[in-house]
Image: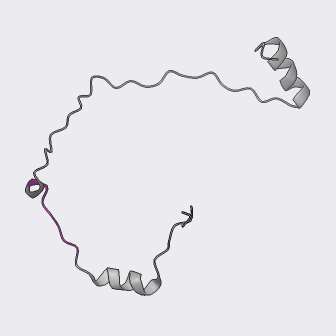
């Protein structure tokens, strides 16, 4: 058996039957789960501003900037 990436889709009759079923609501207290948050927010800051990008006209200009300014090529 080979697993596939494609998921299975619900058929229309199964969707219609699922709409009629009652939804059981379970209170969290009955599950014995701790509802306290274990995280503490120490600070909230905006990210630093970035420089505006540069729009290049052609590939030659890009290659020139990569060679001379960025020293990548």
Q: Is residue 47 above or below residue 19?
A: above
Quadrant in the picture for the N terminus = bottom right
Identify the residue at image location x=27%, y=23%: 42
Total label count? Answer: 0
Q: In the displayed image of the protein, which residue is found farthest to the front? A: 1
Q: Is residue 57 above or below residue 22?
A: above
Q: Quadrant of residue 21?
A: bottom left
Q: Main secondary structure of the magenta part?
A: loop
Q: In the displayed image of the protein, which residue is found farthest to the bottom? A: 13
Asked if the stretch drawn in magenta spans residue 27, the answer is yes
State the extent of the magenta-drawn residues as a range: 23-29
Quadrant in the picture for the C terminus = top right
Out of 22 and 55, give the one closest to the viewer: 22
Identify the residue at image location x=76%, y=15%: 70
Out of 35 and 59, give the one closest to the viewer: 35
Q: Quadrant of residue 35?
A: top left
Q: Is residue 50 above or below residue 28?
A: above
Q: What colouring does the structure picture have? A: one colour
Identify the residue at image location x=47%, y=82%: 11
Q: Quadrant of residue 51?
A: top right
> Could you tell whether 53 is left or right of 16 in the image?
right
Image coordinates for residue 58, horizontal then vertical, percent: 88, 31
Q: In the displayed image of the protein, which residue is found farthest to the right? A: 60
Image coordinates for residue 40, horizontal then vertical, percent: 23, 28
Image coordinates for residue 34, horizontal then vertical, percent: 13, 44
Q: Is residue 73 above or below residue 35?
A: above
Asked if the stretch drawn in magenta spans residue 8, the answer is no
> Could you tell whether 61 is left or right of 13 in the image?
right
């Amino acid at each position: 058996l080979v697993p596939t990436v494609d998921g299975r889709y619900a058929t229309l009759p199964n969707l219609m039957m699922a709409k009629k079923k009652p939804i059981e609501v379970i209170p969290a207290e009955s599950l014995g789960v701790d509802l306290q948050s274990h995280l503490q927010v120490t600070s909230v800051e905006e990210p630093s501003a970035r420089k505006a990008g540069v729009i290049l006209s052609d590939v030659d200009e890009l290659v020139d900037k990569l060679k001379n300014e960025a020293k990548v090529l």
